[in-house]
Each structure stands twice: as C-alpha cells, then as structure tokens.
Image (cartoon, helix red, strand yellow):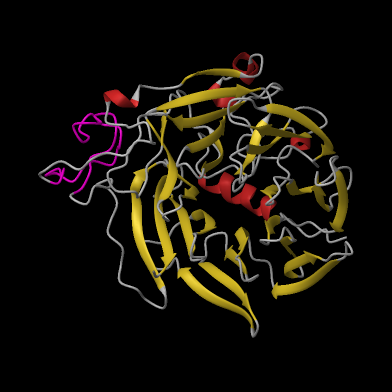
C-alpha cells in the first residue's frame, strides 16, 4: 500500500501556515483539510468534513425532525421573479447602472424589480461580471466575482449553457447566474459560511442547492439544508442526514445527495427522492473518517454510484445501488482522493493521485478495473467528466500551481493550461469544478484564494473558463 504523505496532509500544513483554517470555509471543504481526529486538535476545515469550533454552533440544535419544509425566502413576485424561475424582462433603458455595481451583490441598489439582487449591466447580467475574452487556443475566460467576494467553485449549467453558482455575503447565501435578466432573491440561509454540497438546475429550470452548517466539535446531528427555487420563491427542506458532500439530479428530476454522519462510525448517508418528499437512507458503508474523500454520480436509470475512502483500511472503494441494494468493491489499495464520472451508458470511471502518478480506472462489463496512467507525479485532481463520445476530461492542479484541463484522445492525453498562476496576480490556493454543456463543451469554474500577508484575512475571486462556442 502506498503510504506516502497524502495531499490532504500537505494542505493541512498550507492551511496552518497561511491561516486559512482559522475562520471559515474559504474553499469547499473538499479542498481544505483540518487536522485529523486523532491529532488531539478539533477538525475545523476538512476536505469533505470539519466543523467550526470558533463559530460556537451546535448543528444538533438545527437538525430537527426530517423533513422540514418551509418558504425559505421572499416571494419573487415582490422582486421581479416569475413563476418560471425568476426570468426578468429588460427595462426600456437597458437596466444599466451608472456605477457598475459593488463587490456585494446584496446591496439595495439592484435592478428596481429586484432590490435584493445584484446591480445589472446593460446586458442584463450581474454588473460585477466581466465580458468573455477573445477566443485563444480554443478557450475563453471571464471574471464572475471579483477579489474580495465569497463565491464557491461549485456551479451548474442549464439547458442553454448558462451558469449558476453559490455566493455567501453578509451571512446570506445567494445564487448569481450568467443568464441575462435572470435574478434570484436571497435563499433564506442565515449564519456563518456553510459547507456547500452542490448546486444543480433541473430540466424545468428550477435551481437546487444543498448546504450544511458549520458545527461545533463533538456535534453529531449535522443537517443538510436543501433549497429549491420554484414558482418564484426559495423553498427549504431540512434533513438530518449529516455533512453533505455531493448533490446530483436524475433525468426524472429526483434529488440524490451523499453525506457523512458526523459520529464515531462515519456512516455514508444517501438522501434521495422528489424534492418535496426526500428520504434519508443509511447505505451501510463507512468512510475512513469524516474528511474522507467521496464522489457521487447518478446514471440514466436514476441509480447512484459513488467512490470513497473506506474503513478500516485506507482503500479506494466503488459502490452502487444499481441492483437494489448497496454493493461495494475495492478499486485500489492506495491513498488516493478519488473522483468519479459516468459515461452516457453508465460505465464508471475513477481517477486518483498517488505517489506513483495520477491514474484512471475504468470498470468493464465483467467487473474488472482497467487502470492506466494519466500523468506521472502527484497532481491534485479537481474535477472529472466523460462526454458523449467517451472522452474523459479531468482538471489537474498544484497546491499553488497552474490549473490544467486534460482530455483523453486516441493519440493520448492532451493538456491545456487554463490558469498558469504566475506573476503579481498569483493565487495562494484554488479549487475548481468542471461541467459539460448540452453541446459537450467544457466549462470550468475556479475559486482563487489570495492571502495578502500571513495572518491577514484571505480573499477570494471566481473566474470562469469555457471552450469557445
């Protein structure tokens, strides 16, 4: 078994050295790991785990009997939202704002029909968002949220290829979008920065967000808050399912979420069903610890597939409920931080990094895992997808190095550097996600973290890349 220091341990040292773990989830908890539970120090910033002792929150106070449904926000009819998901009609003068907006989307200076939303540009999008750059080497770039904002790299695409992401400002969670003349009121979330589980847009255009609150050391009943924007308002369903780690939608519009129960056994919990009738299921699977990496996907039949670092030994496991019950198997006996993607026919693809390199394993019809090398050396994996042609796309990054898109072709793996991370604008850390649109073009969202000086509050920025139309 490969027992070299994991990438997570290196992230711990990075976090401690620059103070990233001190205050809030700067990046998705998948990206920053708190100290291990056996280290005698509270876990407070873990990848896919971690509480926030300084916040003084007891998630058990919030969990409540599942499910709890309530109107989570203002009626969008009061601020321009329509029953079809918040579409706005542009004003005769174009709706622009002379000052171009401020870094905080939640000021009261938004478009008149949505004072709770962002200031809109003449093009009808958040005025903080830049225009797309010219096409260079097949890619375009734009800035979505400027430095000093608190956006997460999680994002979703709708059927038209417009992006939706999660932003936290002034103890409130909002959903910015690149869709013109389309805004949302605040979600109804109030409190310290949450752990984001994901965001998705269904076929009807309804937006779904999954969040878990920060929690105190020793808490066990950590809830997941599911928000759905429907009929012009946010509706919240709260489930006592644990720390949410992934959110997916199937073709029938049913939600699928994976979470870790915060307790001694680190059970993997599976929440699923129609948005208004969710149920929580104990999979019977156990993760190595609360910060173990997991990855969830759903196939065309609505069956769940996941990979995780399992208990008791640190191995990479694949599990699915395709047979009607959860069945798990070992992919590799390595330290790995795995990612999962499914082909259009439901074939599992798993990628991970270990000291020997960055690897891809594909499961064949006989249940065998065929493993190949993507790149020699350890490269932190950010995200992965398989397009309809069967080509595999992965995002690879360094702790503070470049962000690169790799695609598997008949000639081998082809690399394109999206963010070189050099010069005066060099980030200290980043997290990224990848999505494919209906035309199978790659879209990438990058959250960068900048630490002006040791001990100062980290600053975030969200940039957006896509393959040229």
| Closer-to-camera residue (194/302) | 302
Question: Which span is picked out in magenta?
Answer: 94-121
What is the x, y in percent for residue 84? 38, 36
Q: Nearer the viewer, residue 81 or 353?
A: 81
Direction bottom: furthest residue: 411
Q: How many marks?
A: 0
User: Residue, x 22% and y 31% (percent of image)?
Assistant: 113
Residue 91 vertical placement versus 428 (above, below): above
Percent of width and height locating residue 120: 23, 43
Name the foreground residue: 196 vs 354: 196
x 48%, y 27%: residue: 192
Q: Is residue 12 magenta?
A: no
> Which residue is found at the position 54% from the left and 69% from the top?
405
Q: Is residue 368 left or right of residue 227?
A: right
Above or below, 400 relative to 81: below
Quick check: is 100 in the magenta stretch?
yes
Rendered location of residue 283, percent (x, y): 81, 35
**Side of 416 relative to 368 (left or right):** left
For this view, does 375 lie left or right of residue 20? right
Residue occupying the point 53% across, 58% down: 434
Q: Is residue 42 above or below residue 391?
A: above
> Is any part of residue 289 visible from this angle?
yes
In percent of width and height, residue 69 lies at 55, 18
The answer to whether residue 58 is visible is no
**The N terminus is located in which quarter?**
bottom right
Q: Main secondary structure of the magenta part?
A: loop
Q: Can you say whether 425 is above or below 309 in the image? A: below
């Amino acid at each position: 078994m490969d027992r070299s220091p994991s990438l997570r341990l290196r992230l711990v040292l990075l976090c401690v050295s620059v103070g990233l773990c001190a205050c809030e989830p700067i990046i998705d908890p998948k990206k920053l790991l708190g100290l291990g539970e056996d280290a005698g120090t509270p876990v407070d910033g873990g990848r896919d785990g971690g509480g926030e002792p300084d916040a003084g929150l007891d998630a058990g106070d919030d969990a409540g009997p599942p499910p709890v449904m309530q109107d989570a926000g203002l009626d969008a009819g009061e601020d321009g939202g329509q029953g079809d998901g918040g579409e706005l009609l542009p004003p005769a003068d174009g709706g622009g704002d002379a000052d171009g907006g401020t870094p905080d989307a939640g000021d009261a200076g938004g478009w008149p029909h949505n004072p709770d939303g962002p200031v809109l540009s003449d093009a009808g999008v958040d005025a903080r968002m830049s225009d797309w750059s010219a096409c260079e080497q097949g890619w375009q770039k734009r800035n979505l949220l400027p430095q000093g904002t608190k956006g997460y790299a999680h994002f979703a695409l709708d059927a038209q290829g417009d992006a939706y992401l999660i932003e936290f400002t002034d103890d409130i969670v909002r959903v910015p979008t690149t869709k013109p003349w389309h805004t949302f009121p605040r979600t109804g979330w109030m409190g310290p920065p949450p752990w984001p589980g994901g965001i998705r847009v269904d076929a009807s255009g309804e937006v779904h967000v999954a969040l878990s609150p920060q929690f105190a050391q020793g808490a066990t009943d950590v809830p997941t808050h599911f928000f759905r924007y429907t009929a012009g308002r946010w509706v919240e369903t709260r489930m006592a399912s644990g720390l949410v780690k992934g959110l997916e939608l199937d073709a029938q519009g049913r939600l699928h979420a994976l979470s870790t129960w915060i307790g001694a056994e680190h059970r993997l919990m599976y929440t699923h069903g129609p948005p208004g009738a969710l149920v929580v299921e104990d999979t019977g699977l156990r993760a190595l610890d609360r910060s173990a990496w997991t990855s969830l996907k759903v196939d065309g039949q609505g069956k769940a597939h996941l990979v995780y670092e399992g208990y008791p030994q640190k191995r990479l496991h694949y599990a699915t409920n395709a047979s009607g019950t959860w069945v798990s198997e070992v992919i590799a006996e390595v330290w790995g931080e795995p990612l999962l993607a499914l082909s259009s026919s439901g074939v599992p693809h798993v990628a991970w990094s270990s000291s020997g390199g960055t690897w891809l394993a594909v499961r064949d019809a006989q249940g065998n895992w065929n493993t190949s090398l993507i790149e020699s050396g350890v490269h932190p994996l950010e995200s992965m997808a398989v397009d309809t042609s069967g080509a595999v796309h992965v995002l690879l990054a360094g702790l503070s190095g470049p962000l690169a898109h790799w695609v598997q072709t008949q000639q081998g793996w082809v690399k394109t550097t999206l963010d070189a991370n050099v010069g005066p604008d060099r980030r200290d850390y980043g997290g990224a996600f990848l999505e494919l649109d209906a035309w199978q073009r790659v879209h990438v969202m990058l959250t960068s973290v900048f630490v002006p000086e040791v001990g100062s509050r980290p600053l975030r920025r969200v940039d957006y890349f896509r393959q040229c139309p």
